[in-house]
Amino acid sequence: MDKRFLTYTILIFLFLILYQALFMKPQTKNKIVKTTSTQTDTTQVEVKKAATIEVKNPIVVKAPTFEAKFSRKGGLLVSYTLNKFHDAYGKPVELIPEGYGMFDFEAGDIKGINLNFTADKDTFVINGNENIVLKAKLNDSLSVTKTFKFDPNIYMIDYTLAISGYEGKVLYRFDSGLRGTEKNVSEDLKNFKFIYYKDKLHKISLGKLRKSEFRAIADDFTWFGIRTRFFTFDVIHNGKFHQVVAKAHKNRISFVALSKDGPHPLKIYFGPIDYFLLKNVGYDLASIYEFGPPIINIFSKIILYSFRFLHRYIPNYGWVIVIFSLLMKVVFWPFTRYSLKSMRKMQELQPRMKQLQKLYKNDPQRLNKEMMELYRQYKVNPFSGCLILILQLPIFWALYQVLRTTIDLRGAPFIFWIKDLSSPDPYYILPILMGLASLGQALTQPAQDKNARMMALFMPIFITVIFLKFPSGIVLYWFIYNIVSVIEQYMIKKSVAEGR
């Protein structure tokens, strides 16, 4: 109990510190990204403060999965709500901050925000791909057309900007940023990032952008955009833009992109960070989903696929976690049995080890040799207690990552007071139950002395305090795991006593 339990607790504590320090920070520094293409002066692209927009009589687009609203002034997307996802008040999440809009542009002296757009209808009801056309006329020879084609099933938008009589540079403005959607605002803001894909995913956090804006040559970017904890807006352009600039405005991230040879058709993904959906869309958008550092990436994927498979047959994700915890006990059963049996053999050898320590107290090398011989003679591995810890830690870490990032678990209830498995238990009941189960597990394991027994009583309290702010899902997993561990240890103790 002593060394094993203490080692395990220390590993979890180090995991928390290292994870926050190393993997919650942006991995990309703010600098101009150079390519082999012809360079242009990036200082000409400026991110201006977006003017707040008063929306009157908007053009509405309704679909089974979303509802969008466009302003007539500027033809901007000023509201975008997703029907399948809800905010803390039970309403469909709104992804556009109030008073701001997406899809503005500047082309020479033409500023999109100054134009008045019209449409064929005030309200469009769509079930499949259908063009939403917004038109504005400057004069007899110059007009602007914005065409949007929505695919409501995969949250894709085909966007085409056409400016008659103009062939110069076009600055696309994505001013609104994304609105926070989570009840825990500070936790939500940690996930606000500007992201882009160039051979791999690159991320610049809101905090970094508050210190300095991000400028880049974007010729070889596949896509770029912004994300929150669970949602993302990404412009897929495949080399159509030459420059991109991102900037923070308090709790928003806006960005602009410069096309040097006129407007181009664009594909936009605007929806949830759902790994399976993003994978089907393509363009390496699935890289937005954070599986964690490479050391646990494969474990996170296995857990995510396992959850999705189990959810086909078990509609409640809480019970999915319970079943998964039981499956993990089955997987680890041979290792746990071997580990606990070795620990009990070590306990039986304690009198012999103390004799050796007394006999060779002045000869450390001889003492080590004799102890190794004792282990060999009785077929005991002194490091067997660490084996189960090494195997469990990546699973625990990966589960933590999946539970805090998978949108399927966002707002997923379990039973009674557990309304969101991705958030902490608001009443701390589950962490306390988990702590009691940890105490029960600790008391069923052998302790070498009084100090070890005191440590066994203290560590469950320590772990409970740590778990208070963990997602309810991972606390549930560990609660079930500990409950079964108590039963498991009793069975192993009984089998050892019977000589089996």
Image (cartoon, helix red, strand yellow):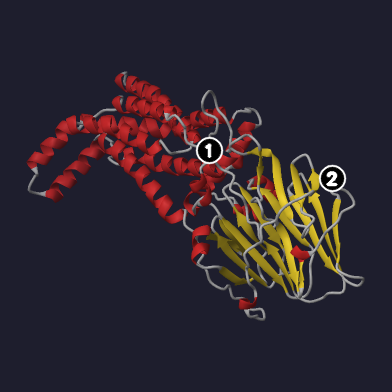
* Tag of residue 123: 2
The answer to whether mark 2 and mark 1 are in CB contact below 8 A is: no
Quarter of the N terminus within the rendering: top left
Task: Tell me the amino acid under the disc marked 1.
Answer: Ser
Q: Mark 2 or mark 1: which is in front? A: 2
The residue located at (59%, 76%) in the rendering is 34
The residue located at (65%, 50%) in the rendering is 98
Relative horizontal placement of residue 478, taking residue 168 as reference (left or right): left
Whether residue 213 is visible: yes
Residue 457, position as x, y percentages in the image: 27, 29
Q: Residue 135's quadrant in the figure?
A: bottom right
Task: Tell me the amino acid under the disc marked 2.
Answer: Thr
Quarter of the C terminus within the rendering: top left
Q: Upstream in the sequence, badge 2 or badge 1?
A: 2
Pointer 1: residues within 10 angstroms few (<14), some, or many (20+)? many
* Tag of residue 237: none
Whether residue 381 is visible: no
